[in-house]
Image (cartoon, helix red, strand yellow):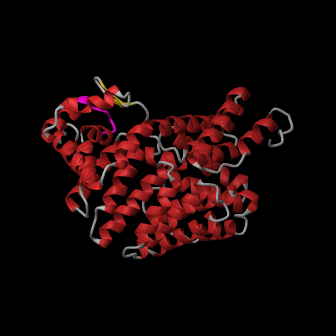
Amino acid sequence: MLVLAAAAEPLGSRSLLDRAAGLLGIDPAAADPAVEAGLLQLRSRVEFAHPLVRSVVYRAAPADDRRRVHHVLALATDGDTDPDRRAWHRARATAGPDERIATELEESAGRAQARGGLAAAAAFLRTAATLTQDPARRAERALAGAEASLRAGAFDATLELLTDAEAGPVDDLRRARIDLLRGQVAFASGLGSDAPPLLLTAARGLGRLGAVDAARETYLTAWASAVFASGGAGADTLPEICRAVAALPPPTGAARPVDLLLDGLVALHTDGRAAAGPVLLRAGRAIAAGAMSVEDTLRWAWLATAASSAVWDHDSSHAIASRTVRLIREVGALAQLPVALAALGTATAWTGDFPGAAALVVEADAVATATGSGIAPYAMLRIWRYRGRKPKPPP
């Protein structure tokens, strides 16, 4: 049982394991056979010889034993100094729905997100949803988990949670949010032909509900997905998006940078560069100066980088791209990293640093492969063009 407790505690805290052994009434020497066999080390940290050993020990144990050790580990964890670990163990100690533990996990997700732990926040919310009995609340937690999973780059988990959210009561607002997330997954994962119509549907739904700001943001995502869809898949949807934006009421307050970006990009498509230039210059300079929140920067700055380049404001373009990549690395928003790196690579190429630009694009491709994202090779093609060389054919 002590070795199972060690396998159930992923951070390998020796002091926590010792407290758990006391609560279980187990002599620490009970782990000696595993130590002597080279499977486990009990030093200042508890370490298994290989992660697979830990996994086998844990999964081979009966479910009741696993719940028992998690219960004891939760009791041995100080809820004041480490509430998130305590909530995690409490969740795994329960065999059915438990609203109190689900609420604790929701709170843990908020703390994880505040410190940039998007993957941890998504995991907390996924578990909270499974422990929720009320169908409406379970659907809302699944939807929140899907949003966090998308930001963390976990596209399969996002889609699974959206299916869970659809299993509960779905009003018009929740349907629009689900459509939006499905469109964002399609866009981020490279399923370009699916994204524009999904996002257009979501934007229209939000507009009908009077959520003007959310609708404008969704139209901006739809515009980007239509423009960047591979093989011209968004060509038919783009005019619809532009017409819908033109028919929208104005923003609910003072125009935000994201509003300027949307209006400028639509004008770029419908009226040309001369008409769009002043609006896009204003948007790019505001974003480069830090006028956009961190959350909005993570969502839109890569597009602002391209928009600034379109009106030859390369200083703003590079400043926006550099800040965006730094913020994404800090918060762990892996879903956005490939596109942001590619945008920074393009902006860096304009400075004449072609090796640095190429290195950024190579990193973008590596991250895209690791996360399952799809990213078109536009940035590298531009670098080759700026250098006056023909692109290399794919291997």
When the figure is inspected, residue 377 is found, relative to residue 95, above or below; the finding is: above
Figure quadrant of the C terminus:
top right
Viewed as shown, does residue 272 lie left or right of 258?
Answer: right
User: Residue at horizontal 57%, vertical 66%?
Assistant: 199
Residue 306, horizontal then vertical, whole percent: 65, 46
Res 248 → quadrant: bottom right
User: Residue at horizontal 17%, vertical 42%?
Assistant: 79
Q: Which secondary structure type mostly characterizes the magenta part of the structure?
A: loop
Residue toward you, 183 or 295: 183
Residue toward you, 172 or 240: 172
Residue 157, horizontal then vertical, whole percent: 47, 57
User: Residue at horizontal 27%, vertical 28%?
Assistant: 32
Q: Which residues are magenta?
A: 9-14
Q: Residue furthest top?
A: 43
Could you tell me if residue 116 is visible in this image? no
When the figure is inspected, residue 266 is found, relative to residue 66, above or below; the finding is: below
When the figure is inspected, residue 188 is found, relative to residue 332, above or below; the finding is: below
Residue toward you, 9 or 276: 9
Could you tell me if residue 90 is visible in this image? yes
Query: What is the number of callouts on the image?
Result: 0
Res 346 → quadrant: top right
Residue toward you, 20 or 266: 20
Figure quadrant of the N terminus:
top left
In magenta segment, residue 369: no
When the figure is inspected, residue 359 is found, relative to residue 24, above or below; the finding is: above
Viewed as shown, does residue 46 lie left or right of 212?
Answer: left
User: Residue at horizontal 49%, vertical 36%?
Assistant: 329
Viewed as shown, does residue 76 lie left or right of 123?
Answer: left
